[in-house]
Image (spheres, grey):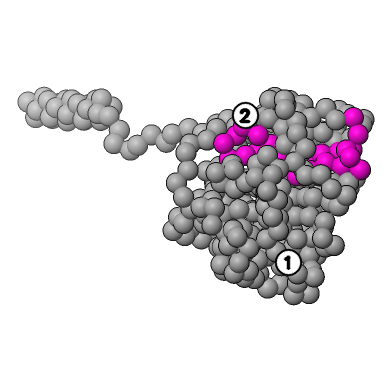
């Protein structure tokens, strides 16, 4: 009798244990499942190696520029000598470097420093096809090439006003480089700066009220800002080395520029009053000629980092210097400024 009772108790224990185990197996796990790692999307052009770059943070200021209409961010204009033995020509491409289109077909000289008009219809550039540097314009489709300046001196660095009605530029027609302004058709050329030193490379603020430019009037090239009529010229950089080629961001918050304060030229940015200077590129070769995307989120620039000759290629980076990516692949023959619309 006692053995039968023990057997019955044992059977009940076994059944209870089995029920608990079955319930455990049937109950869903409360621990979250770990998501598989993301697979990076493949890009046509790989990003550059880090190259020990530690980009400086770019402070975000209040927007001071005028409101801008949405713009197609997918077009660049730039110079390349890749496909033309007669000299460097202007090309357009998508912002990722695809879909090259030949813009100029000039048989002599070379084209440099091209700039889109803010309305995207016309491009201005300098060329020496006439023997000295002069400024020309051409429609965005390559038609209607027109000479805007005509003298025996050198006219250079054209820059559009934000309403596409005027062009600032530098010229040595009066003995040394000074800043001038003209209508978009080349008429009504007027001098804005007047001194015995060299003033060059103008860049208009997006509200149209001011022009940034470079000048060596204080001993070495520094960046200045003046009103659009040439008054109130104010120095905003103060470096023992060279600060040149200012480029005002379309939102008005920053000015990008190039400086050789560390030996070779690198790209920097700063507030329009010269404060909060931030280095964006770091290398042992030149990184130069910054220009902004229309939404001010990126900068296109020129670099020699992948070239053994004295030319370079075109790169794009975020406004804080991150994600530097080469977007031209043309055997190190792209030179001068690339501009974005």
Residue drawn at x 45%, y 55% is 63
In this image, 308 relative to 155: left or right?
right
Quadrant of the image occupied by residue 88: top right
Label 1's element? loop
Residue 301: horizontal and vertical position, in percent? 70, 47
Secondary structure beneath label 2: loop
Image mark count: 2
Quarter of the image where the N terminus is located: top left
Residue 120 placement, left or right of 265 = left
User: Residue 265 versus residue 114: which sits nearer the camera?
Assistant: 114
User: Which numbered tag is attached to residue 194?
Assistant: 1
Between discs 2 and 1, the one toward the N terminus: 2
Residues drawn in magenta: 107-131
Q: Which residue is at the front of the view, 34 or 56? A: 56
Q: Comparing marks 2 and 1, which lies closer to the viewer?
A: 1
Name the residue: 80% across, 70% down.
196
Cα distance between the residues tagged 2 and 1? 53 Å
2 or 189, nearer to the observer: 189
């Amino acid at each position: 009798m006692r053995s039968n009772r023990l057997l019955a108790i044992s059977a009940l224990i076994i059944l209870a244990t089995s029920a608990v185990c079955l319930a455990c197996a049937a109950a869903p796990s409360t621990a979250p499942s770990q998501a598989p790692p993301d697979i990076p999307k493949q890009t046509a052009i790989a990003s550059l190696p880090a190259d020990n770059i530690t980009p400086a943070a770019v402070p975000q200021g209040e927007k001071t520029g005028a409101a801008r209409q949405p713009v197609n961010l997918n077009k660049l204009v730039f110079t390349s000598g890749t496909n033309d033995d007669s000299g460097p020509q202007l090309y357009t491409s998508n912002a990722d470097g695809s879909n090259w289109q030949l813009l100029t077909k000039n048989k002599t000289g070379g084209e440099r420093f091209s700039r889109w008009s803010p309305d995207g219809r016309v491009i201005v550039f300098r060329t020496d096809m006439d023997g000295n540097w002069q400024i020309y314009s051409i429609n965005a489709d390559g038609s209607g090439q027109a000479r805007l300046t005509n003298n025996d001196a050198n006219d250079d660095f054209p820059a559009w006003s934000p309403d596409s009605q005027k062009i600032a530029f530098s010229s040595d027609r009066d003995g040394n480089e000074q800043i001038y302004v003209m209508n978009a058709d080349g008429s009504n050329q007027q001098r804005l700066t007047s001194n015995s030193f060299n003033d060059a490379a103008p860049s208009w603020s997006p509200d149209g009220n001011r022009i940034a430019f470079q000048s060596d009037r204080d001993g070495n090239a520094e960046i200045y800002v003046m009103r659009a009529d040439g008054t109130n010229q104010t120095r905003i950089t103060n470096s023992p080395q060279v600060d040149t080629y200012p480029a005002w961001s379309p939102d008005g918050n920053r000015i990008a520029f190039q400086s050789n304060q560390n030996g070779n030229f690198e790209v920097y940015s700063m507030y329009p009053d010269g404060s909060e200077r931030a280095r964006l590129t770091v290398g042992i070769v030149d990184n130069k000629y910054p220009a902004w995307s229309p939404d001010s989120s990126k900068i296109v620039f020129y670099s020699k980092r992948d070239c053994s000759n004295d030319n370079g290629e075109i790169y794009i980076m975020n406004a804080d210097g991150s994600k530097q990516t080469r977007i031209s692949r043309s055997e190190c023959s792209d030179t001068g400024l690339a501009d974005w619309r």
